[in-house]
Amino acid sequence: MNRQTSFQRSFRRRSLWLLSLPVILAAIAFVIATTISLQPIAPNDFTGALKITGVASFGYLIFAFLYSPAYIVGLMWFFFGTSGRDADLKMRISLMPLVTACFVWCPVMFVPSLNMEERILAFLALIPTTLIVGFLWSFFVRWAVGMSLRGHPALDNGGAADAR
């Protein structure tokens, strides 16, 4: 039982680190984009790596604006829902995109230039992307964490192989 608890804690800790990676990247992109926008350099002077970094940061920030509030709700749902000993971690990771998709309406509803019909259409357009990218990301997290824990002692008995 002790090995299984250790395995579950390791699985949860590693999952949380990987799941928080998009939020960390959004913060880094915000810092980079803000730093570049505060430079007294004309946009024509941006070349090479600075230009690529700036475009990537601004592009990521657009996606972060659209998806981060919903993703943070999903991440908090996973965090609080897996704090107990009997939490089903793999099921929570698998359902996280559905929770995220339920809250993707948040940024769209706060754009004042859109009327209500356009807001609803934008919300409906964001849902498929949220689900597709979310399921791909959750399967990657499950795979990466599972691969990193292959040598864990709890797997010798096969008792914690399902990360329950």
Image (cartoon, rainbow, N blue to C red):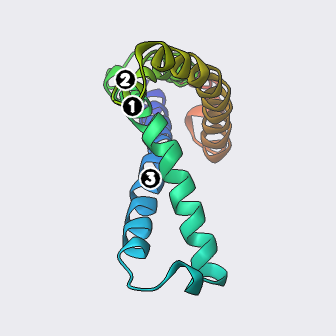
Q: Which of 153 and 42 is in front in this view?
A: 42
Q: In this view, does 62 lie above or below 67?
A: below
Q: Please tell me how crowded label 1 is: few (under 14), some (14-19), or many (20+) other residues with Cα within 10 Å.
A: few
Which residue in the structure is indicated by mark 3?
Answer: 26
Q: Position of residue 75 (x, y in %)?
A: 40, 31
Residue shown at 46% from the left, 15% from the top: 102
Spatial separation of the CA atoms under disc 2 and disc 3: 21 Å
Type of amino acid at the residue the image marks with label 3: Ala
Secondary structure at badge 2 equals helix
Secondary structure at badge 3 equals helix
Which residue in the structure is indicated by mark 2?
Answer: 109
Instruction: Report the mark closest to the observer, 2 or 1.
Output: 1
Secondary structure at badge 1 equals loop
Type of amino acid at the residue the image marks with label 1: Ser
Q: Position of residue 42 (x, y in %)?
A: 49, 83
Q: Where is residue 161 in the image (x, y as percent from the top left)?
A: 62, 25
Spatial separation of the CA atoms under disc 2 and disc 1: 10 Å
Q: Nearer the viewer, residue 121 or 24?
A: 121
Please report whichever mark, 1 or 3, sits nearer to the chain's N-terminal start.
Answer: 3
Q: Is residue 159 visible?
A: no
